[in-house]
Amino acid sequence: MASSSLSRSSKRKAQVIMPCQLCQGTSPLKRKCIECAILICDNCETNVHGGHQIIDIKDMDFTEPKPKEIKLTKLNTIKTDDLLFTILNDTQLYCLSKTGQTNVIRDFKPLLPKAIHVSDDNIIVSTREIGDAFPLTDHSRRQIVVLHQTGRRRMTVIEYDQHDKRLFSIISSLQMDKMDNVYGVDCVTCNDIGRIVKVVKKSITWIYEGNSDINTEGNPFSPRDLTISQLGNVIVADKLTHSLHILSGEGVLIKFCKMKDINIMFPLSLEINSNGNLWVGCDTNEYSKENAKIHKLDITGC
């Protein structure tokens, strides 16, 4: 009886012909358009891509690129869940898409972007000049830049008050509330001693520099991050005292939380998620990495 099965020796491997990435035709791929980053056939090179930079497919480097280590300074997400980030000593604001593609959203040259915050309608970025952050000079540029949600169009630049006096030293972290008021961590020394400022229409309406019952000469106010609660209060991470300061929208201290009592040390970064949970990222000291943890907290009444 004849068998319908094929012997192992008679099996053949099929090859799939990759179509031209422009016309989708099956003509052989012989070129790559550098400007469009696609593989094309001879027809498309002649009829469509004239004037573009083209290389022969034989000259392409198919070796897998080695991962490049970069030092990120800030991260944030936008409505599309794409990731915005800045790189140390780089003038550009980048966007990493969910597909893994990286694009430049904006180049702040000759300034360096530092803090990033994304609101419903805007991207807010703090910037400073290239070079040493301190001491400040007449040539220092310390700004908060409000961009359209796409990042392409600049809406507002906040740098000086109505008397042409500089408003900030270095804004290392910032938030915007529902009324479009900006809150920032303003570092005033090179060792991260700082203050909290509230900016309304290019003017500082209040400044919080810590509390004398909490912050002493030995443990000065060292704010590293802030976030805004669902009730509109400002929660500040004070690294050196291992604590959180909770302020009203008017800058009044409502509550002081000793995080060391629940084994949360060196609070460095804060974020409140859509469920109202407070996430606290921690730093380490120079002797140990034991406390480099992320904590998820339930918060009520603030």
Image (tube, rainbow, N blue to C red):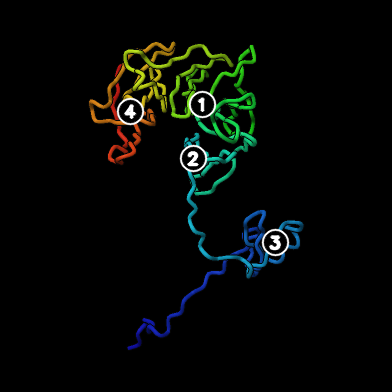
Point 29% across, 31% down: residue? 265
Please give the label number shown on residue 237: none
**Percent from the top left, x then y, of residue 23?**
66, 59
Q: What's under tag 2, amino acid-wise?
A: Leu
How many angstroms separate mark 3 from mark 1 (CA)?
Answer: 45 Å
Q: Earlier in the sequence, mark 2 or mark 3?
A: 3
In this view, the residue in front, 149 or 261, is 261
**Percent from the top left, x then y, of residue 267?**
34, 30
In this view, the residue in front, 241 or 201, is 241
Q: Earlier in the sequence, mark 2 or mark 1?
A: 2
Q: For the residue carrying disc 4, how many other residues have a C-alpha within 10 Å: few (<14), some (14-19), or many (20+)? A: some
Please give the label number shown on residue 54: 3
How many angstroms separate mark 1 from mark 4 (CA)?
Answer: 25 Å
Point 36% across, 81% down: residue? 5
**SS at mark 3?**
strand
Residue 292 position by quadrant: top left
Residue at the spot of label 1: 171
Q: Nearer the viewer, mark 3 or mark 1?
A: 1
Residue at the spot of label 2: 83
**SS at mark 1?**
strand
**Percent from the top left, x then y, of residue 39?**
63, 62
Q: Earlier in the sequence, mark 1 or mark 4?
A: 1
In this view, the residue in front, 159 or 79, is 159
How many angstroms separate mark 3 from mark 4 (CA)?
Answer: 52 Å
Q: What's under tag 4, amino acid-wise?
A: Asn
Please give the label number shown on residue 277: 4
| Labels 3 & 4 near each other (Cβ < 8 A) | no
